[in-house]
Image (cartoon, rainbow, N blue to C red):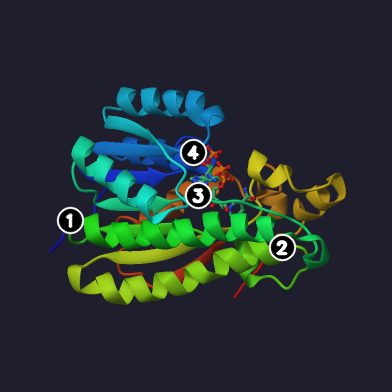
């Protein structure tokens, strides 16, 4: 029987410096992960990467950080190669990278379209490809998508559209990697209390989203909180291994599929 616990495992988290990715990194360290590589993209994220790194080391994990724009196949190949060189082959690979745009189709430029699909679709695809090449047998692979995949709504065409492709990457990868015991899933949080969400939303939309979920009244912020997602991720990349090929919306009853 494979050991599905987090204890002693090696982890790579793209976007693992801050917000949801940073909490997932800390949570897996607390659960006993042996080594964790976190990735960040922009220079502005470096202080948060340094803080996360210090917290992971304080929790007893061997921790390293890598900077990369992951919108090329080569960058994803380098991230996995650097990770293997620094901490060994990962047992768990989690991609939290994302980019959001709230805009009518009529106002969306070609450059905006390309940027959205580069981050949410292309980077996710090549992360999944490299994970297939580098994950240990019985590994776990997870991508963050969005609960908008279950919504019928205007203005998020490039965001929901570019994340929607990941559902099919997940299905294919779970079949292709399943012979090696690797579980592959996608998790779609509801609107989440991080700067990622507030950057695109006017106050009236924030107020709407704070009351839109069935369980809104019982959440800290009314929104999905990163503390609600991290335990679910921990379960999926450990004892929840039997779930594979799925896109799961975790949102307190905001949208369903
Ligand atoms: N917050 C929400 O309302 C919400 C709801 C549902 C789903 N999600 C999804 O949850 C995930 C985490 O979001 P979050 O709220 O925790 O916000 P976040 O910390 O801003 O996460 C987005 C991450 O993507 C990285 N990134 C952006 N462009 C990149 C590029 N070209 N190459 C590599 N990395 C890049 C960012 O790094 P830098 O900042 O360093 O550029 C950041 O670490 C995202 O995939 C998002 O789509 C968020």
Residue at 30%, 69% in the rendered image: 242
Q: Which residue is mark 2?
A: 156
Tag in front: 2 or 4: 4
Q: Quadrant of residue 256?
A: bottom right
Can you tell which mark lies on residue 50?
none
Q: In this picture, is 141 found above or below 66?
A: below
Q: Which structural element holds mark 2?
A: loop
Can you tell which mark lies on residue 3?
1
Decide: marks 3, 1 in contact (CB < 8 A)?
no
Q: Position of residue 92 (x, y in %)?
A: 29, 52
Q: Nearer the viewer, residue 175 or 251?
A: 175
Q: Does the beta carbon of the residue at mark 4 sit less than 8 Å from ligand 1?
A: yes
Decide: marks 4, 3 in contact (CB < 8 A)?
yes
Q: Earlier in the sequence, mark 2 or mark 4?
A: 4
Can you tell which mark lies on residue 97?
3
Q: Quadrant of the C terminus?
A: bottom right
Q: Position of residue 151 (x, y in %)?
A: 69, 70
Q: Earlier in the sequence, mark 1 or mark 4?
A: 1
Q: Earlier in the sequence, mark 4 or mark 3?
A: 4
Q: Nearer the viewer, residue 222 or 92?
A: 92
């Amino acid at each position: 029987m494979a050991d599905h616990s987090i204890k002693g495992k090696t982890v790579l988290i793209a976007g693992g410096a801050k917000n949801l990715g940073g909490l997932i990194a800390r949570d897996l360290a607390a659960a006993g992960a042996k080594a964790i590589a976190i990735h960040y993209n922009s220079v502005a994220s470096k202080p948060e990467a340094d803080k996360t790194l210090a917290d992971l080391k304080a929790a007893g994990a061997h921790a390293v950080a890598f900077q990369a724009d992951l919108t090329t196949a080569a960058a994803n190949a380098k991230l996995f190669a650097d990770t293997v060189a620094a901490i060994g082959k990962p047992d768990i690979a989690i991609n939290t990278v994302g980019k959001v745009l709230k805009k009518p189709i009529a106002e969306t430029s070609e450059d905006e379209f390309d940027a959205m699909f580069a981050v949410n679709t292309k980077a996710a695809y090549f992360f999944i490809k490299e994970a297939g090449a580098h994950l240990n047998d019985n590994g776990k692979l997870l991508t963050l998508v969005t609960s908008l995949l279950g919504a019928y709504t205007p203005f998020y065409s490039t965001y929901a559209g570019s994340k929607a492709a990941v559902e099919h990457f997940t299905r294919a990868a779970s079949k292709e990697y399943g012979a090696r015991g690797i579980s592959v899933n996608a998790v779609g949080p509801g609107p989440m209390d991080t700067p990622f969400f507030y950057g695109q939303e006017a106050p009236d939309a924030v107020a709407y989203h704070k009351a839109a979920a069935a369980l809104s009244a019982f959440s800290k912020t009314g929104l999905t909180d990163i503390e609600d997602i991290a335990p679910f991720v921990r379960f999926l990349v450990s004892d929840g291994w039997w779930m594979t090929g799925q896109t799961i919306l975790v949102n307190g009853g905001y949208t369903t599929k």
